[in-house]
Image (cartoon, coloured by chain):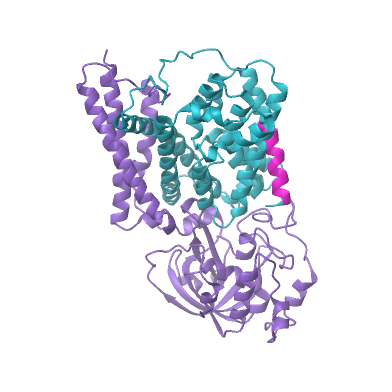
Amino acid sequence: MNLLSAEGLGTFKTMFISIVLEALPFLLLGVFVSSIMQAFIPESWIRRIIPRNALLGVAVASLLGIVFPVCECGMIPVVRRLVSKGMPLYAGVTFILAGPIVNPVVYSSTFAAFQSLPQLVYARMGLAVAVSAVVGLIVLLVTKDNPMKQANFAHAGHSHGEASHPAGPGHRIEEMLKHAGGELFDMGKYLILGSLITAAIQAFIPRSELIGIGQGEFGSHLFMMGFAFILSICSTSDAFVASSFLGTFSVGSLLTFLVFGPMLDFKGTLMLLSVFKARFVLFLFVVVALCVLAGSIVTGKLWL
Amino acid sequence: MHEHRGRALHDFIRAVLLAGFSIYIARLVSIDKLHYYIAPKMILYVKLSALGLYVLAGYLLYSAIKQAFAKKRQNDCDCGHEPPKSLFMNVAVYGLFALPLLLGFAMPDQIMGSSMASVKGMNLNAASAQQTKGPSSLPPPSPSPSESAALPEASPPDVAETSGPEEDPSSSADASKSPDSGGAVAAEDEESLDQLFPADEFSLNLAKLGKKLYRKDEVQVQEEGFLEMLTVLDMYRYNYIGKTVVISGFVYREDDMGDDQFVVARIAMQCCSADAMPYGFLVKWGKGADYADDTWITLTGVLGLTDYNGNEIIELNARKITIINPPDDPYVYPYFDNFDKLAGEA
């Protein structure tokens, strides 16, 4: 390990800045789109969209992100509000899982990061839809009582886009900018931290040592799941981190990183715990982990 | 309460940080070094981001001023974006944002070269490193020499992830081996050419290019399509034994290379430095020690094969070496244009 040699530091600095700069446009795009949605789109629209039939319901919920792209951080408060106002729980869960992945911003950033490997992009979208639908159905079948924490619903009565709000367009724009600034810092810190760690790994640990982990059948997938969990990078930018491991880690394990991360990472889990009871979150965690693991191993073998 | 003034401070710091990023990007553009960090395709979007950041910074500054002079507290957006209360957390988070700025402004902007290559591992078998799916008639894929374990790269088709290099996969690989060690197989008509250059649906382009290059006296490897050319030469290496190759790149050597050995390489970038990988050819030149690491050269050599750390790779027997100035953009990128152009046609 050429730890902290002048050259090593130079490489580290280049890689660190490089990942941050690459991801920045997508982070900004995600933040702006999410903020526009928060400020301008009433939730009543979303509630009306989910069909009653369970199968159709998960199908729609898993694809909802295409029309309503919200970054995973903005996702959970939004879904909490929706479910408390009548959206079925299982559809809410499906939306939480698929929304951060199956949307145009994430699609384009994944595509940009993996130009020579479009199959990975399609696999990411497909697996996300599949896993979220399956988990949603499992939740429907297994959950009996309401797992939501009661509660802090009286949160200052500030509901976006509802009639009580003083609604001039200028005010809305200001609101949007305020959101955008806040969200940028909320999510940006994970991006920078994640880039820091990734650049350090890339610059200081020789690839030969990483390859041993990266090619193991299960080991590579488990490592990538753990890595994604800890990094907690926004889904609009995580593709760039993943692509730095191309060639070292198997493509299947990268798929695991790209699907598991946005569904369940450290910060997302914390947010889930603030909304749902701990037992439910644990249950969700296990089911999602198993589905993603199985799904990406199978997809990796058959297709990638 | 001083809450709104505290909020004003936060907004002010944030405005400064975002403006800092905006200025940093602008600076890289003005000294024309943005491409040291990101691929040309992405440059426009990064510039647009700088603009977006500038707008946000402007708003945050306005908001800071408004709150600093406000009589009472502004309504917060109440959506979970309040900054944390503890001083430690705030210092940590803003410090985190400041870190790339500090590193960016304080440290020089470097071209990545030997030092990065030694950490990432030099790829001397472009074909196996690039193929995610390749024809089953490829000669056995061999990993690059700096790996300690012999393992394949991004999943070649029927290889399970844990296995080592495959045994010689099929008879067409034998057909493309030269009958004697000295020269490439002499075959001129289409059919025997097809046999020399087996391809599947994913490598049709490469096979076609390979045939065109085969007919040439001298193969010029340019910056455009560098990686694709290396892939073709490596994939069908048996057909090019004895061919003259002209290539430019920087000098790199592994610790265990002799005085008469080094690698001529370039760094290939997909989207950004983080995914950049070095690719090159091993070179044999009696006075190799004359060329220090990271020297840029143009080299004319004859293609041969050799064994390096248990892997069969291409080796260029150098005939002529010229030192050149490092190009403005030292990296190479994926090639999306007509492959015929790479053969000097179309």
In the displayed structure image, the side of residue B127 where residue B179 appears, left or right: right
Boundaries of the magenta span: A288-302
Which residue is drawn at the image coordinates 61% and 28% (left, top)?
Answer: A91
User: Which chain is assigned purple?
Assistant: B
* Residue A185 x %, y %: 39, 33
- x and y percentages locating residue A286 in the rendered image: 68, 28
Hue used for the chain lettered A: cyan
Camera sees residue B43: yes
- Residue lying farthest right? B171
Question: In the picture provided, is A296 more to the left or to the right than A274?
Answer: right
On the picture, is B202 further left or further right than A116?
right
How many tags in the picture? 0
Q: Is residue A1 visible?
A: no
Of the 4 image quadrants, the one containing the N terminus of chain B is top left
Q: Position of residue A16 (x, y in %)?
A: 44, 45
Give the quarter of the image for residue B291: bottom left
Task: Please tell me whether residue B240 is drawn above or below residue A131 in the rendered image.
Answer: below
**In front here: B284 or A24?**
A24
